[in-house]
């Protein structure tokens, strides 16, 4: 009984962290907010049968879960490769944005003749 309580509290803590990251991700484009929110609700649904029943009545959650299950047909090696490509794209995007910011700051600081 105590072990079940500890496991449920662990799920709730992980879900709270994921949902918090999801909320932050909605305001900062670097974090995938919707993904973290979905994962947070998915983990919270494992901790509580009421939450799971409520989630199953939500059409948006069912649609995302359907897409999630359909993506399960993709092999792990392809998932890892796609994740690496997406992370590389985001990294290059961040480097490009940082380059633009530095370039703008240097132009403002440069003395005019």
Image (tube, grey):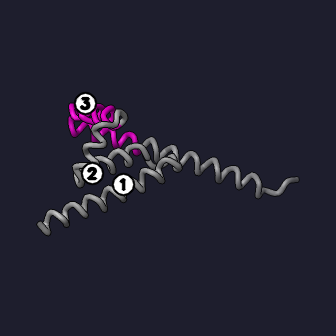
Q: Are marks 3 and 2 in contact (CB under 8 Å)?
A: no
Taking depth in this image into account, of 17 and 97 the one nearest to the observer is 17
Query: Distance of mark 3 from mark 2, alpha carbons?
Result: 19 Å
Q: Are marks 1 and 2 in contact (CB under 8 Å)?
A: yes
Q: Quadrant of the N terminus?
A: bottom left
Residue 59 in magenta stretch? no
Choose the circle earlier in sequence order: 1 or 2: 1
> What stretch of residues is rendered in magenta?
61-87
> What residue lies at 64% left-to-right and 51% top-to-bottom?
101
Query: Distance of mark 1 from mark 2, alpha carbons?
Result: 9 Å
Residue highlighted by disc 2: 43
Q: Quadrant of residue 105?
A: bottom right
* Position of residue 97 in the picture relative to residue 86 (left or right): right
| Residue 6 at x, y percent in the picture | 19, 66
Residue 75 in magenta stretch? yes
| Residue 32 at x, y percent in the picture | 43, 45
**Viewer-side label of 3, 2:** 2
Q: Is residue 23 above or below residue 70?
A: below
> What residue lies at 51% left-to-right and 44% top-to-bottom?
93
Q: Secondary structure at mark 1?
A: helix
Residue highlighted by disc 1: 18
> What residue lies at 46% left-to-right and 47% top-to-bottom?
91
Q: Secondary structure at mark 2?
A: helix
């Amino acid at each position: 009984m105590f072990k079940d309580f500890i496991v449920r509290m662990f799920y709730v803590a992980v879900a709270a962290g994921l949902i918090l990251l999801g909320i932050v991700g909605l305001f900062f484009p670097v974090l995938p907010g919707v993904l973290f929110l979905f994962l947070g609700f998915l983990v919270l649904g494992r901790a509580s049968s009421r939450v799971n029943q409520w989630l199953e009545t939500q059409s948006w959650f069912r649609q995302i879960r359907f897409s999630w299950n359909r993506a399960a047909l993709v092999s792990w090696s392809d998932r890892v490769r796609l994740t690496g490509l997406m992370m590389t794209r985001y990294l290059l995007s961040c480097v490009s944005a940082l380059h633009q910011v530095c370039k703008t700051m240097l132009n403002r600081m440069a003395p005019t003749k």
